[in-house]
């Protein structure tokens, strides 16, 4: 069946519930339909490709994980709608010349909520409203009082009231959504484990679920994904709600990264790489991992050092994608092997990176010496040193400083055993024709019978 939008979902779920193996195919793999295009021809083309075994099913969570993904996406949508009404609250305050956003970083925080609800209750005195200030707020009561000198127009107060009521409505819906998610995660729990205490600083994320999601995530997959630096409870919940805990659908970590759209592209033609850019994707798990990668910029962990090193050698967007790719591989390894992630620290990573750089430079130095050898050989090469043996061309190179011989036979270079020459006579011998009798292919051997040394093969 060919479908757009969400029209395929009811039929897909119905066939799956009746025992059919249903394939959800990526439209990019079947877009080249031969001949004139119509819905009937598209279906026939899909049937033909399927009969030849050329189609593979796309990933889709099974069972309760599919239900968890639906509710998790609904929760994300409610958060976006609620954020829109926060902007409406800020706009209504600004129209009344109440600059609450200048003294508070979050107008829907504890202090902001108390002040706004007091305003809707009829309070207009700035000093009285400033007394709702929490002790953690940096701005003083005097600064808050100056920011609360507004016009208090009725139409703007009404707009503020409607925006606050809508904000509260979505807060109630989010609470009901969290209760549903908690029940689904309890049904999916397979392990009786308890997480260790966090060593990292920082409180609970603002938009995190209102229940102990870290405990339920650990009981779902058997490993604590929040031990990975940059991944908090919200990120781990979003990733697991999209992919589930069963990674058997992906053959390897490379397949998993490719599905996320985080691996380099392979646009190659004629042996030349035309583009290595990652493909454009709307994968929600990939977006969550990219946000987690950005959070590593100040981390003193090995992943933080890796991210900062990448930012130093490429633009930030590519560094974020590369770091998100590493996070995806770590998650795949933890879910498939059941092993906990242990951070070695920034110092350990930098020391290992230093050793790797030194090793590569040493290898590069040795390689450059070999290239210098071939270059010095070519400086002394003349046409008289080429010989034709049994229809093949053979060329002799001699390097005075290293006293090595390089044999190029039928286009293939091979280092032979070192030959001992007298250096003052080397250049003179190379410039003259050296007779080489046809024989077995053995390393060059110098004959010491006379001063006119000959070289046999």
Image (tube, helix red, strand yellow):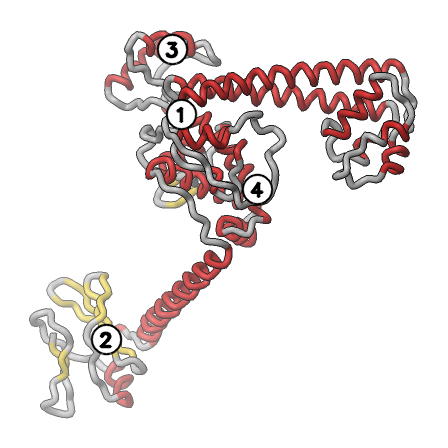
Q: Secondary structure at mark 1?
A: loop
Q: Earlier in the sequence, mark 2 or mark 3?
A: 3
Position of 445 with respect to 215 (left or right) is left
Q: Nearest the camera: 320 or 248?
A: 248
Point out residue 438 in the picture as x, y percentages from the top left corner: 9, 72
- Give above or below for 297 relative to 442: above
- The residue carrying mark 2 is 405
Q: Earlier in the sequence, mark 1 or mark 3?
A: 3
Give the CA separation, mark 1 to mark 2. Answer: 69 Å
Q: Residue at x 21, y 84 (%)?
A: 420
- The residue carrying mark 3 is 13
Of marks 2 and 3, the one in the foreground: 3
Residue extending farthest to the left is 439
Point out residue 449 in the picture as x, y percentages from the top left corner: 9, 90
Q: Earlier in the sequence, mark 3 or mark 4?
A: 3
- The residue carrying mark 1 is 189
Q: Secondary structure at mark 4?
A: helix
Is any part of residue 280 visible from this angle?
Answer: no
- Give above or below for 213 relative to 23: below
């Amino acid at each position: 069946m060919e479908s757009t939008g969400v029209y395929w979902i009811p039929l897909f779920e119905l066939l799956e519930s009746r025992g059919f193996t249903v394939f959800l195919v990526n439209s990019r793999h079947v877009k080249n339909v031969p001949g004139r295009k119509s819905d009937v021809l598209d279906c026939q083309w899909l049937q033909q490709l399927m009969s030849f075994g050329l189609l593979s099913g796309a990933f889709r969570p099974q069972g309760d994980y599919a239900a968890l993904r639906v509710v998790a996406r609904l929760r994300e949508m409610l958060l976006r709608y609620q954020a829109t009404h926060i902007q409406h609250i800020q706009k209504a305050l600004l129209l009344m010349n109440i600059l609450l956003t200048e003294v508070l970083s979050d107008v829907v925080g504890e202090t902001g909520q108390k002040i706004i609800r007091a305003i809707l209750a009829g309070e207009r005195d700035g000093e009285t409203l400033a007394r709702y200030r929490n002790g953690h707020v940096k701005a003083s009561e005097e600064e808050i009082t100056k920011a609360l000198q507004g016009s208090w127009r009725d139409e703007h107060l009404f707009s503020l009231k409607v925006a606050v009521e809508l904000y509260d409505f979505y807060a109630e819906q989010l609470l009901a959504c969290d209760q549903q998610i908690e029940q689904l995660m309890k049904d999916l729990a397979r392990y009786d484990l308890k997480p260790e205490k966090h060593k990292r600083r920082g409180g609970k994320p603002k938009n995190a679920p209102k229940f102990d999601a870290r405990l339920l995530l650990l009981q779902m997959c058997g490993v604590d994904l929040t031990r990975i630096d940059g991944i908090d409870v919200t990120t781990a919940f979003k990733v697991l709600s999209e992919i589930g805990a069963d990674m058997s659908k992906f053959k390897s970590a490379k397949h998993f990264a490719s599905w996320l759209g985080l691996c380099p592209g392979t646009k190659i033609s004629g042996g030349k790489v035309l583009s290595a850019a990652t493909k454009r994707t709307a994968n929600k798990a990939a977006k969550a991992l990219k946000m987690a990668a950005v959070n590593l910029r100040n981390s003193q962990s090995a992943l933080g050092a890796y991210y900062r090193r990448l930012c130093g050698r490429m633009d930030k967007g590519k560094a974020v994608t590369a770091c998100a790719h590493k996070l995806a591989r770590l998650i795949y390894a933890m879910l498939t092997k059941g092993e906990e992630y242990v951070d070695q620290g920034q110092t350990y990573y930098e020391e290992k990176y230093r050793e790797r750089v030194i090793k590569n430079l040493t290898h590069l130095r040795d390689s450059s010496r070999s290239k210098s050898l071939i270059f010095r050989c070519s400086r002394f090469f003349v046409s008289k040193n080429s010989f034709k043996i049994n229809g093949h061309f053979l060329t002799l190179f001699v390097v005075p400083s290293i006293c090595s011989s390089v044999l190029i036979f039928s286009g293939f270079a091979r280092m032979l055993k070192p030959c001992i020459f007298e250096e003052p006579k080397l250049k003179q011998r190379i410039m003259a024709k050296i007779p080489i009798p046809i024989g077995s292919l053995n390393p060059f051997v110098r004959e010491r019978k006379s001063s006119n040394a000959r070289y046999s093969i």
